[in-house]
Amino acid sequence: MDLLRGVCLALVVVATVGGVAVFVRGVMRIVATVRIGRPAPGRFAPVGPRLGMLLRELIGHGRFQHKPAVRIAHWAVMVSFPLLFLTLVSGYGQVGNPEFALPLIGHLPPLEWAIEAIAWLSLFGIIGLIRLRLRIRPRADQPEATQRRSRFFGSNQAQAYFVEATVLLVVAAALTLRGLEYALASQDPATEHLASAWHFPLTAWYGSWMSGASTGALETAVVLVATVKILVSMSWFVVVGLQPTMGVAWHRFLAVVNVYARRTADGRPALGPLMPLAGPDGSPIDLNALEDLPDDVRLGAGAVEDLTWKALLDVSTCTECGRCQDQCPAWATGKPLSPKLFTLALRDHAAATAPYLQAARAGSGEVEPDPHAGVDLVASGVIDPDVLWACTTCGACVQQCPVDIEHVDTILDIRRYQVLMESAFPNELGGAFTKLERQGNPWGLPARARLDWAKGLDFDVPVVGADVESAADVDYLFWVGCAGAYEDRAKKTTRAVAELLHIAGVSFAVLGDGETCTGDPARRAGNELLYQMLAAQNVETLTEVGAQRIVVTCAHCFNTISREYPQVGGRFEVVHHTELLDTLVADGRLVPTAPPEATTTTVTYHDPCYLGRHNQVYSPPRELLGALPGVELAEMPRNREMSFCCGAGGARMWMEESIGTRISTTRAAEAVATGADVIATACPYCTVMLSDGVAAGAAAAASPADARAQVGVPEVADIAVLLLDRVRGS
């Protein structure tokens, strides 16, 4: 027995020293990689709110709200890591003395109960997670299209199985030791009182099975199991320490830091406003500061070292779970963009490049530049252009990520470099940029046509500066937007909102030809300087006319004016038209009536990404629909936070969709499948895209080559149009 203990003790000591040393080396390599990034100010304060948010996220596992079983399983495995660490510490003592227990707390019942409960939960949890991975993993004998439907497509399965096997073995060893400890305690009169359900509430039942074994056999078993437990744990330390890009293992440490350093301390995901264009020191760059910048400044992220340290921490934290990929509309429709694979490409490139960049920075200042510095992420092939420009910035990846990776900010920062520094962008955007710059709208139509939508109304639409002196003289300034002014389908929404406000007695005015594009298409396409020019012009105009409360029909205008203009000094109270109309209906100022025919109209509602996911406006549109007599809501399978994009965001409205299936067609098919008579929208972009998607689906169904049954073609209409019909009683 003494010889066995000596051998086991030697193995444990060697394994621990080696494991900890290699693990620390891995930590240092990750820190070195993150440190090559640019500053990201404001990520550590305020400390109190951030710590509170971190605890809520860790304990509540809020990002798993749509997967309750996975939420419980992952929570149990997460909690087991720190709690069962005590059993690892105890194991070191048991190698030398099988009857060892931690001083003071070793036989403390509340701790023993917690350890056993978490160990069992973790055991069932990890088995469940392994079964889930085995069930939905991509298989080599499947067609690639089928494999792509698995969120684990592109993930390193071997690494994941290794981590899951380690957890399984460690937890099993901990539970085995508890049973052996019970049996050993029952054979010694001095410790016999411990061998009870009071100290072994969930393990006494099988510990009693071992009580018939001899004391020597039990002691030997304790030493061997404790040694195995330690060796497995230290093997894990060695493996992950040698592979600092093994996110499936490292995320259990890095996620804590990454979640703490999220963009805001209130727990919201990094959606809504984009992070401002930043200089080398992390401070925002505006048009006025451009002249003061050095000639060699790099705008946006062209090379890996242009990314912020938070972006590099993001890519190091990725656990390859694929939940972002599972929700990405580009990936779901056959595009090459996977938020996960995009992140992994940056992670691997950063890890490979960081040692050279660190060495160059620590060198003696040689004249020759390091060839690893300034490597263009797109030109070098790290990120394919089709990947970069496929993103609709819908934010589904950010919303779903359990470790708070900010994919959209990183994608847009790389776009900024490509546009501002390399002039490398899809050809279609060149025309859109020119029209925005010259005409103030992406359609390239004259400003004098901005009021054409109001022709034929039976009341006058007042214009600020012509009919009213100031926007402060009316209840709301109605921001019509480019689509609402120029796009025929969107004009119906503009007219409907104007009529509804008139009926409700809400005074409003418009800017007419004083409006110009908010700059959303330019910013989402990476043309930050054009965005800032348009934004500065609008902020100046809105301030001059005394705008206080603004109502908008476009979700993109809503997000830009309310969430992004404060970055350039414009702070206004902004409401979306569905919010205002919902309030007017609730107050009785708008009274919907039943249609003459006693029929029920089935309506399905599409959540615009920039209204719902980016700004959390989900209820007002649904409340409006619920207030319409004769309307029955049929939700699509993907709704609210899980809603599928229409395909227009991220300036994709102005780009051709030549790879895979059109996103709008896929979303429209999902809406049609509900059997709805009407697809309700709350954003002109969505109205346009879904109308085109429904038309494309109808054309395909009418094709002789298509054997699908003919179905009714639903109408696509903004909620305001539906409400106006009911208010009119038609």
Image: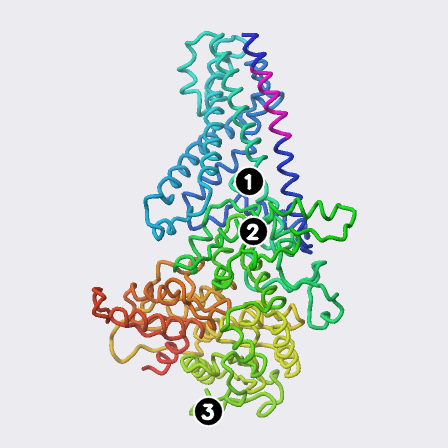
Magenta stretch holds residue 12 = yes
Q: In which quarter of the image is residue 559?
A: bottom right
Counting other residues with Cα less than 10 Å from the Cα at mark 2, is it few (<14), some (14-19), or many (20 or more)? many
Disc number at residue 392?
A: none
Cα separation, mark 2 vs mark 1, equals 20 Å
- Which residue is painted at 32% across and 65% down in the image? 669
| Residue annotated with mark 1 | 252
The answer to whether 317 is drawn above or below residue 667 in the figure is above
Which x, y percent locates residue 719? 40, 74
Q: Give neighbour class at mark 1: few <14, some 14-19, many 20+ (Cα, 10 Å).
A: some
Judging depth in this view, the residue of 267 and 95 nearest the camera is 95
Q: What residue type is labelled 3?
A: Phe
Q: Name the residue under label 3.
A: 459
Q: Please state the extent of the stretch shown in magenta in the rendering.
A: 8-21
| Labels 3 and 2: the sequence-earlier one | 2
**Residue type marked 2:** Leu
